[in-house]
Image (spheres, rainbow, N blue to C red):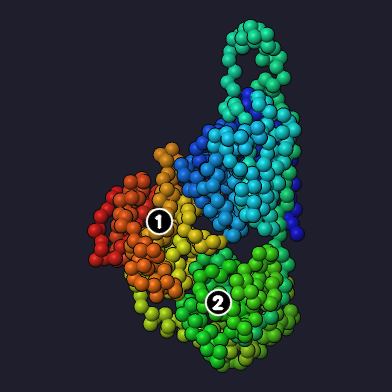
Amino acid sequence: MHETADIAAPSGFTPPTSTGSGAVDQACAIWHALAELGVRDAVLAPGSRSAPLVYGLARPELEARIRAHVRIDERAAAFTALGLSRHDPAHPAVVVTTSGTATAHLHAAVMEAHHSRIPLLVVTADRPAELREVGANQTTRQAGMYRSLVRFEADLPAPTVRRATDVELRTAVSTVARALAAATSEHPGPVHLNLSFRDPLVPHVEPPAADAAGASAAAGAPAADEDEHATGESRDAIVLTRRSRPVPPQPQPVPISSRTVVVAGDGAGPAARELAEQHVLPLLAEPSSGAHAGTSLVPGYPALLAQVMADRGHPLRPDRAIVMGRPTLSRSVIGALLGADDVDVIVVDPHLDWADAARRARLVVPAAIGEDPALAADATDETDTTDATDATDATDATDATDAAGASAGTGATERDLTAVTDTAELAARRAHLAAWSRAAAQISSGLPRSWQQTAALAVWDASGARDTLVLGSSSLVRDLEQHAGPTSARVIANRGLAGIDGTTALAGGIALAQQDPRRGAADPGRVRLLVGDLTALHDLTGLIIGPEETRPDLDVVIVDDGGGRIFSGLEHSAAPPELLRRFFTTPHGTDLAAAAAALGAEARELTTDSLGTALSQPGPGLRVFVVVQEEHSTLSSTL
């Protein structure tokens, strides 16, 4: 199903007059179409074959509509665009590269966009057909190179040399509209446009009229005003196709039992919290779930869940798990809980590529509404049937279930419930939920606490309701899953593939979107990135922001413990120490603060004791805080 298209939007546009280059003509039409369709940002890496797209975007009428960002490294460009799209998927960003190996550097971002279902428009410039497969310089097989990962792809032929025809422009604009519709469809994700360009790749500058006439007469050619391909000739209007936006799916009933738990994986959103609170169920939420708050949240659940699932007779053992989002962090969730033969698994996901790593899901629904015998409603009778001795609990239950029957994931109400009858079942659930929270807190308090975990929690606690926290794929996100409490911040992580590629660039794109003055936020809050040292080193080029570019307001917090601590928590911890250190932990011996400063960032080295204070100090621009263990600190500062 789809929402009605915006009938007030313009039905098309008139492309600019010919520029003297068919390639630039087509680029101008493409950018005008993208601007009309809601694209706000484009990230470009330098190159010659993509030059027409630069000249097209630089036209004055587009400068105020599409912000241009330039990145030297194509991978950084792609992840910057992905970050812009993640912040606001309704307005996906475009990444542009030249031909050749440049296109390969986009692949990691395309993969992440595919698995995370994030719209992303990938535009690669290419040689025309006559230069392919003949050994031409910087020419490879670009068409279809992301085929299994994209929602739509097109290989557009090169337009006419000096003046793109009206048919060529209509074809390009129509293709762009289809690509954007696919990127923002019911199954959002990346799309790929491969654009062939012939020389000239730059606009043609007309000589003075007298000189042009003389030159044409001498050559026996028609004067400029007689040439059918002359620049300045007006164009026919192009109809712009708009596809109506998809609407949320209708919720389907899912059974609720007294020992049901709600699992909120990455990107689950507030629907998971709503469902858990409506039915007074334990909520096991990953840090980037978008549901890590509320009365049902069980902080510190991973260690407890491992114990619970190891004992079939454990009083907290679930008999059903309702899964929302994509769980990726805890083996106690993915393997022990969702892989247990005595746990009924229900997945809530509107897409066909739903998450079911254990392959034990019995039911998949696009959106969920609880089918709960413990909740009864009477639209006319509001009599209080609760025992007076349980008045406080009844109030709590009403607060937790006042939206019972609402559609999880849509906010739409299937049944208008004006009264909720508390029963012994609901009272038992509250006691059950409290037992979960007590047991999780007790186990967490007994776990050893490292300085790395202290640093991670300092960043978590510093992030408030207006802030965005981006988490790298390292031990730190698992530290937060085990130890972090509720948060009002928006938390984002690249959990589509859980890779470390482009993490800094991604956070930079998110920051650029969040601080965009066109969004009208008086106080947009701060964007913070929390990463380990190897993740930071893997994307040092994400710190390179040219002097002509808008700098993101971004705090990068790097926990430098000399290598990949995550492997010591996996099965590789049993490897011989020398092998573990060299091939898994991989110590780097790099002065990260000096490296960041050399790339133009304001960089400081500090310890956990001073991290909270540093984060609380206001400051625009790109700041890097390298957190080290106190005995290893040189307390260096490069400002």
Front one among 630 and 583: 583
**Mark-to-mark CA distance, 1 and 2:** 30 Å
Q: Is residue 634 left or right of residue 222?
A: left
Q: Give the residue at x 75% y 33%.
A: 167
In depth, the one of 612 and 626 nearer the eye is 626
Mark 2 nearby-residue class (10 Å; few <14, some 14–19, many ≥20): some
Instruction: Provide residue 353's location: percent of width, then percent of height.
Output: 66, 64
Asked if 507 appears above or below 394 in the picture, the reply is above
Question: Is residue 46 something one can see in this rendering?
Answer: yes
Task: Name the residue rendered at 37%, 52% in the picture.
Answer: 623
Number of labels in the image equals: 2
Q: Residue at x 67, y 47 (%)?
A: 153
Answer with the quarter of the image where residue 24 lies. top right
Q: Can residue 183 be seen from the camera position used here?
A: no
Disc sitting over residue 536 in the figure: 1
Query: In this figure, which residue is indicated by the disc labeled 2?
Result: 335
Q: Amino acid at mark 1?
A: Ala
Secondary structure at numbered mark 2: helix
Nearer to us: label 1 or label 2: 2
Q: Position of residue 511 (x, y in %)?
A: 48, 52
Rendering coords of residue 247 (x, y %): 71, 59
Up/down of 514 relative to 438, above or below: above
x and y percent of residue 334 in the render? 55, 74
Q: Secondary structure at mark 1?
A: helix
Of the numbered discs 1 and 2, the one sitting upstream in the chain is: 2
